[in-house]
Amino acid sequence: MLPLQAVLSSEQVGHIRTRLSNLPYRDGALSVGALAKEVKHNEQADLESEVTRELQAHVRETLAGNALFSLYARPVRWSRLLFARYGSGHEYGRHYDNWNKKADDEGRMRSDMSFTLFLADPDTYEGGELVLERPEGPLTVKMPAGSVFLYPTGVLHHVRPVTAGERHVCVGWIQSQIRNEDQRALLFDLDLVLANLPEGEPRLILAKSINSLLRMWGDV
């Protein structure tokens, strides 16, 4: 799991929110299976709109261009991104994300990682926290606009009811070059160490070892 602050600038967030404000929204439960349909209560921007497709591409390119995001997730395929809003009384009950998603190239993809990109500041709405279930206890996430939270697909989670204001988010899924969560985390740590090593033999050996692990674990 990885929180990243200020992945989008306030100008980018404002641009996205302005474009979204002119789009029709539909019942979010229409985009999920039978189990999630019972607990999903929000609205989603029209996926077929040209504006939505432009915003999807903009968000995807921005996230892919963030060095830490790319190092952690190692994306090879992306789902279609969803722009959702939660008004007062909206929530998303306890659920898990499906392993198989429609990709942005219209095929199907394996979802290894899920992410929530926050498009509203926490002080503009009450409630609406993303809560992830972990063996060591629940993790509650509510980040500033422009921040993103990455987590393994399959983790049970829910969004608490919004009691005032509006929660705006973009959510999506990634098929990673590295399928296994522990292997992704190990490679991320090694890459961070590599970035801080001076030129020389230790740096070369570590880079070679990372390359060998990618060959061993990579799924492209």
Image: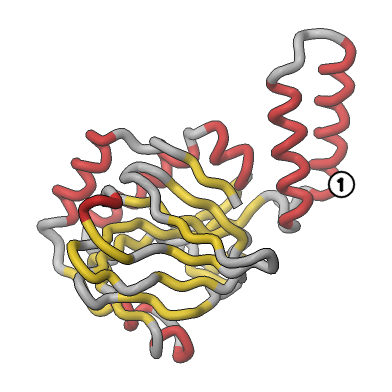
Q: Is residue 51 visible?
A: yes
Residue 206 in percent (x, y) is at: 85, 25
Side of 32 where 25 appears, left or right: left
Residue at 25% of width from left, 65% of height from top? 85
Residue 105 in percent (x, y) is at: 46, 58
Where residue 25 sits, quadrant-wise, is bottom left
How many labels sit on residues?
A: 1
Where residue 91 sits, quadrant-wise, is bottom left
Residue at 87% of width from left, 31% of height from top? 209
Colour theme: secondary structure
Q: Residues within 10 Å of mark 1 (few under 14, many from 20)?
A: few
Q: Is residue 105 visible?
A: no
Question: What secondary structure is found at the residue carrying circle 1?
Answer: helix
Residue at 39% of width from left, 36% of height from top? 6
Residue ID for mark 1: 216
Where residue 163 sits, quadrant-wise, is bottom left
Q: 218 or 40: which is nearer to us?
A: 40
Residue 38 in percent (x, y) is at: 39, 90
Side of 165 where 56 appears, left or right: right
Reply above or below: 109 against 215.
below
Q: Amino acid at mark 1?
A: Met
Reply above or below: 145 against 65.
below
Task: Determine the residue located farthest toward the left in the rendered image.
Answer: 22
Residue 84 in percent (x, y) is at: 29, 64
Side of 183 where 130 appears, left or right: left
Task: Determine the residue located farthest toward the front in the rendered image.
Answer: 137
Residue at 54% of width from left, 66% of height from top? 132
